[in-house]
Structures are given as C-alpha cells and as structure tokens.
Amino acid sequence: MMDCVVVTGAGGIVGRSAVARLSKSGWRVIPIVSPTSFADVSGAVAADLTRGWPDVGPFSHVVHLAAALTHDPRYRDGDISGRLTRQIDDTVLAIAERFGARVIYASTCSLYDPADPREKAENSPVLRTDTPYRLAKRETENRLLSDVRAMVFRLSAPYGPGMFASTVLPRFIETARSGGTIEVWGSGSREQNFVHTDDVADFILRAMRAENAGLYNVAGTSISMRELADRVVRIVQAGRYAMSAARDPMEGQTARYSVAAATRDLGWRPTIPLDEGIRKCRDLEFRH
C-alpha cells in the first residue's frame, strides 16, 4: 500500500500529466476520472465524487485535483461550481482520513488580490473568497493546513494537452491558426500567469518524494494579454492581433507569484519557457 497513490481529476489537464509522471517514476497509480470525462487515461476508475468514493482499496497518498472548475461548460453557474467542489473535497478528505493517507491538494492562485501589483508569496493576504468556488477552495485549504502531513499548492493557470477551448490561450491559438484576428480588450495590460502541466507534474512528484507539508505556490510566466497575443501570432505564424474597443472587465489585474518556497524546499521551479509551451500547444485539439 505504501507506494500507492490515488489521483483525483485524472482526466483533467494536470491530472493526465501527473498520472504519467508518477507512473513512470514507479508509483502505483489509481486514476479517478469523472463519469462524464472523455479523457483516455489507462486504468482509470470512473466515479462521481460528489456522491461517494469508489471501492479502489487502501492507498497511502492522494493527489487531489478534482474540482467543478468554473470554465468547464458543465459548471458555469458559480453556485453549482462551489457546491460541487465542496462535496468533492468532503468525500476525498473523509476517505483520506479513514486510510491515514497523505493529501496533496490543488488550490488556486486566484485567491490572491489581482489588484496588488507586487509578487505574491504564500504569506501574502488572501482577499478573494468572492465566489462560491474560491470560498470552497479556501475552506479546504484551512482544513488541510492544520494537518502536519498535508500539502496545499496554489496553482496559476495550467496549460497543456486537454485545455478547454473557452480559456484564453486556446482561444488565441485557434483564432491565429485559422488566420483570424485576436481581439485584445482594453489596454491589453491585464495579466495571466501560465505554467505548463509538465512542470506541475514535476512539482507533484517532488512533493510526493519529499513528504513536505504546508503551502506552496506553483506558477510560471506572468504575461499581459497584448504580449500573449503577439507571441501566439509569432509562434503560430498565422493570424494577427488588434486592440479592441471592448472594455476588459478585468482591466489592471496582475498575476505575479513567487515560487521561492518551492525552489527552496523542493528544488522546484518551472523549466518550460512560455514560447516553448505555446509551440507544444499550437497544433492541439482543444476541449469544447
């Protein structure tokens, strides 16, 4: 049992990379996917974690990635997203306690204040529990951070195979490769922070091996929407971008996160430059 890890949300973009990396490194992995997942994950167990836990036997670790993400077309309603995420977390934490399993939990960097232009470290104020989803994430963080064995990692925007077409990077890539014009709203200064799923999987593997506890940021490159559009057009070698008269409802938001703690304690830092990551994604089919 001691080398057995359950990965929830194994059909998601981070989950698939994590399952592959852990399996290659010798862990016995039990992937759990949603019954509505279309992901092809070898050996996956389909289960609705809002209703209960599947009979997969005992395990020593759980990498808990499953959530009702708000950009998933199935969970666009904020109240539904928050309620289902909380139910999933309750299910997973209860079974982890039953087996005495160590929990590695994916939270979100969106809890930090995006109006703060400074680089946010783990001890920076958490000011955003303004949606049911973020509130559910923060509540589970608090539950786990009282556990001396649990680890919480706040994740910025992961990108890689299996991304939803509705998110920013796939929209820009699809528009450019069709020869269209990427519309950049507002001043184009609003930022997003992208980290490749292979880098996230590497963090998870290091966390499993090190047995560290506590809170860590897992983030990559912070970039403005205007600069992102310019890079996508250059790397895809098609399309164009133009400034739009449309107002950006998130004008002025920043996405700057320190990973110094993960580097210090786990030897982790992102290694895939954003340009290389975009090249890896330019020919992908995205999820609709």
Image: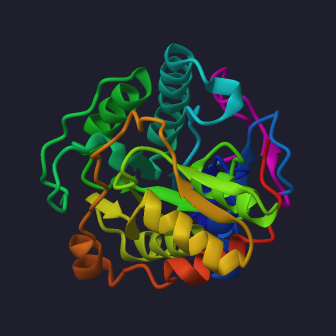
Magenta-drawn segment? 41-57
For this rendering, which residue is in front, 157 or 265?
A: 157
Residue at the (34%, 50%) spot, across then down: 109
Asked if residue 189 lies left or right of residue 182, the reply is: left
Q: Main secondary structure of the magenta part?
A: loop
For this rendering, which residue is in front, 30 or 180?
A: 180
Asked if residue 183 lies left or right of residue 12, the reply is: left
Q: How is the image coloured?
A: rainbow
Question: For the N terminus, which image quadrant?
Answer: bottom right
Q: Quadrant of residue 49?
A: top right
Residue 237 shown in magenta = no
Q: Does residue 26 appear in this view?
A: no
Q: Quadrant of residue 235?
A: bottom right
Residue at the (66%, 32%) spot, across then down: 53
Residue 50 shown in magenta = yes
Marks counted in the figure total 0
Asked if residue 97 lies left or right of residue 267, the reply is: right
Q: Position of residue 168 (x, y in %)?
A: 58, 51
Residue at the (40%, 71%) spot, across then down: 221
Q: Position of residue 146 (x, y in %)?
A: 22, 42
Question: For the C terminus, which image quadrant?
Answer: top right
Q: Quadrant of residue 211?
A: bottom left
Q: Extreme top residue here?
A: 79
In this rendering, the answer to whether 202 lies above or below 177 is below
Q: Does residue 29 appear in this view?
A: yes
For this rendering, which residue is in front, 235 or 71?
A: 235
In this rendering, the answer to whether 147 lies above or below 138 is below
Q: Position of residue 68 (x, y in %)?
A: 59, 31
Q: Position of residue 131 (x, y in %)?
A: 38, 23
